[in-house]
Structure formats: structure tokens, C-alpha cells
Amino acid sequence: MVDIHLYFSQELLGWFHIHKRTLPWRQNRDPYRVWVSEIMLQQTRVDTVIPYYERFMERFPSVTALAEAPEPEVLKCWEGLGYYSRARNLQAGAREVVDKYNGVIPDDADAVAGLKGIGPYTRGAVMSIAFNRPEPAVDGNVMRVLSRYFCLEDDIAKPRTRVQLEHLARSLIPEGAAGDFNQALMELGALVCTPKSPGCLTCPVMVHCQGRLAGKETVLPIKTKAKPPREERRLVALIEGNGAHAGKVLVRQRPETGLLAQMWELPHLLEDGGNQDGQTPKTGRGRKKKDTVMEETSAGSGLASAPDSNQSAQMEQLGRSLAAETRLLVRPRHRWMEAEHVFSHIIWKMDVFLSDFGFVLKENEEQKSQYEAVLRGELTAAEQRASYWRSETAPARVLSESPVSAVNEIAVSSNEPEQQGHEIPLPEGYRWISPEDMRELAFPNVFLRILRNYWELN
Ligand code: SF4
């Protein structure tokens, strides 16, 4: 009688030695290289990871180099891979290695497990691949392969099942071949026993695969569905510079902690009203495609069409809320693009508005009542002012032509420094950028796409 456990381990190992892919992190068994690759590969495809990995290793070739690098540089190098907390945790872990272990990743499973950002899977991968220790490394690929081969019908979304599979995987590791065996399991899951269409006919363990023999290879593994991410509607201001900042766009840096900490973005906010659940507003326009540039008139300026009532309400909210939060007065011109950003727990559905820069309200007693008027939604004069500013009409003329109002008074006094060739101080964390500045600053993917789109068209 065949021992299907032994058969599995031997056949799989033999197959791996012949079919394993040549990948940059397989050049040697340096634990740092293994660690970086395993963190990058979480929730990201191998093909996507390769260029990021090579760039990252060139820029941060050792634990010490990573530990000593400024965080913005690490984020910039990670830009586009998403899940930025992985990059932050990786660097925090590297700093722990430098502080506690003199820059040498220890050959000790408990010590490795204690490093920031290292869970059971990464611990197993580093210990087995780098140090050849018989530790299991069970990720989604491995759970799928084991569930199918052993025809296991437990729900792999449950922590208890994962623990059982870790025990099983540990028992399968051939002596002295932990690194190769774990990689072989992952490789089989990635190349042959794939999620939707397992390639059983070319599979090295096909003969004794219990799932296939039971006709359940496409049913297994059993996995209860996670709660779908919550949709959130966001209004984004793509604020175009003028005067000394012509050709530039206003961006801001996110806070030091929390979602996408310290990354750069366009100013945006949650839309008021009943749209946060992601339902289509009653405007008649479609909301079908991710990242859609709306139709425009010449050179992307002016309104593509008369704004519908929802668009007008959005523009009004965007202007008012930005003024309330930041004292930044802008005039949204029209909805220019739709975009989408998917996190594990949330989806941002974004409407991007091309906007004119007006001015920054000052925080002083003199302007307090006017500021409050702006917050009440009395933006008309300010918007008008912003519009004139964009058309580079002389400020004196603006005053005489536009309605004399409290808000306009603020506009004039606030813009005095700019008129004399000085900078208007921006709210903290805000700055003007040109396309070249994007080489230095790290943006989440969605803002990269929006800005690249914008600069391509302008
Ligand atoms: S025989 Fe099919 S189902 Fe079984 S392990 Fe191989 S690819 Fe997966």
C-alpha cells in the first residue's frame, strides 16, 4: 500500500528540482533577500514583484541599508506595490535586527517571529528557505494544494483549519530539504494546482491526489467568503496652479499614522449624503469603469457639459469642505475623471474635479466672520475671485468688477504677498508639484494614475 504522504513529498521535490522557475530571490539563500521577497509576494503576483524586488535590493542591499534609509525613500521604492504598511513593517523589522541582533537575521524561529510584520507564514518561509529549518510555510497556495491532495473539506478561512494544515505541512517536510519542499508546494500552487483550473494532467502528484480522485478538484478548497469591502464615495480636487505655479498641481501629505500614512495624494474628502454605500447617484450618468476620464472640451478646460444637479452639489461640497478643513479656497470647475482604489476593507469610489486655486484664508480675528460665512456655503464671491485669478485678470480690476463682499475683501488681502511676487503660505503638509517632483514623492496607485493621466493630457 502506497504511503500517500511520502509519495507526495518525494514526487513534489523531484518535480521542483526540474521545473522551478529562475527568480531573482532564488539566487542565493540570504535571509534578508528571502524576507524581502516573501513580504513583497504577499497579495502580489510574481511578475509584478520582480522589477520592484530588483530595484529595492539595488537601493537597499542589506538589512542595515534598509534600517538606515529615510522612510519616504522606502515608500517611494515600494510605490505601486500597494499595502504600504508592509514596507513600513519591513523597515521596522530591519531596525530591530540592527538594534537587537547586530544586523544579522538570527537563525532562530522565535526571534524571527518576534520581528515586526512577520507572521507564521513569513517566519516559516524565512526559516526554511534561508536556514533549511523544518518549519511549515502555509499560505493560500499551500492551503489549496493540501486541501485538494488530501481531500480536506474544512473551511480554510477558519484559523483552526490553518493550524491543522500547518501541522500537516510540517509532517510532510522531507529531512534536510525544508527550503526546497516549501518552495515546491508554493510553486505547485502557483503553476499547476491553480485556483480556477487545476492542471491535473501535468501534476506530479496526480496519481494519488484524493481530491481529484473524488472529482472535487474544482470544488476544493472550501472557503467562506469574507465580508465584501465597504464602498466610500470621495470627492477629489485636482487643483491647478497659476502664476508662479502654472503647470503645477497641489498635493498634500497624509498624516504620520493610519491608512496610507505619510504618502502623498490629491486633496479629497468623503461625499456628503447617501452615497457612501456606493450606490449610483441619480444623475443618469454611468459608473461602470474604473479610472475613466470624462469627455472634455478643448484642452481639458471649461465644462464638458452643463453640470447636473448632483455634480453641482458635489462641487459645492468640495469647495466648502476644503475651506472648512484647510482654509484653502478652490473653485471646482467640472468633474474630469472617475477612479477607484481598492483596499482590503474599503473601496474608494472617486470623482475627480479639475479645480482652480483661489487663495488661502487667513486665521485671524479680522477674517473670522468672513471665514464663517464661507463655511455656511456663501462661496459665490470667492469662487468668482478664484475664476478671475485663473484668467490672470489684474487684481485691481477684479475688485471693481466683482461684487464687493466680505469674502472678496479676504481674497485681496490674502493675495497681497503673491501679487508682490511672494508665496502664499499653504496649509501644513500641502505643496505644489510638477511631473518631475513625482520622482521623489510616494503616491498611492490611484493618485499616480490620476496624475499621470492629467499630465499626459496637458
Ligand atoms: S492532481 Fe489536480 S487537484 Fe490534485 S494536486 Fe494536482 S493539480 Fe491539484
Image: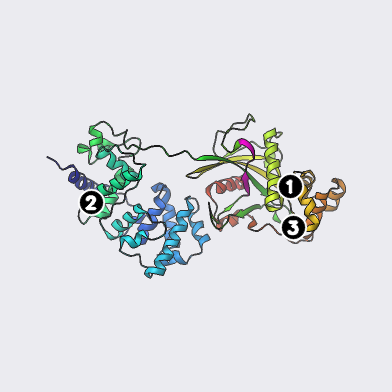
Please state if 202 lies on the left or on the right of 332 as rendered.
Answer: left
Name the amino acid, label 2. Ile
Name the amino acid, label 3. Glu
Image coordinates for residue 13, horizontal then vertical, percent: 23, 49
Which one is in front in this view, the residue at disc 2 or the one at disc 1?
A: 1
Q: Are dots 2 and 3 in contact, CB under 8 Å?
A: no
Residue at the spot 34% in from the left edge and 52% down from the top edge: 121
Please state if 343 lies on the left or on the right of 156 as rendered.
Answer: right
**Residue 216, quarter of picture:** top left
Disc number placed over residue 173 in the picture, else none:
2
In this view of the protein, can residue 39 be seen by the observer?
Answer: yes
Q: Which secondary structure, mark 1?
A: helix
Q: Which residues are magenta?
A: 267-274
**Residue 122, quarter of picture:** bottom left
Image coordinates for residue 148, horizontal then vertical, percent: 28, 38
Farthest residue to the top: give it.
284
Give the labeled residue for mark 3. Answer: 363
N-term mark: 2 or 3: 2
Ligand 1 within 8 angstroms of badge 2 C-beta: no
Q: Which secondary structure, mark 3?
A: loop
Give the labeled residue for mark 1. Answer: 375
Image coordinates for residue 184, horizontal then vertical, percent: 27, 48
Separation of residues labelled 2 and 3 (CA atoms): 67 Å
Residue 73 is inside the magenta segment: no
Residue at the spot 41% in from the left edge and 69% down from the top edge: 99
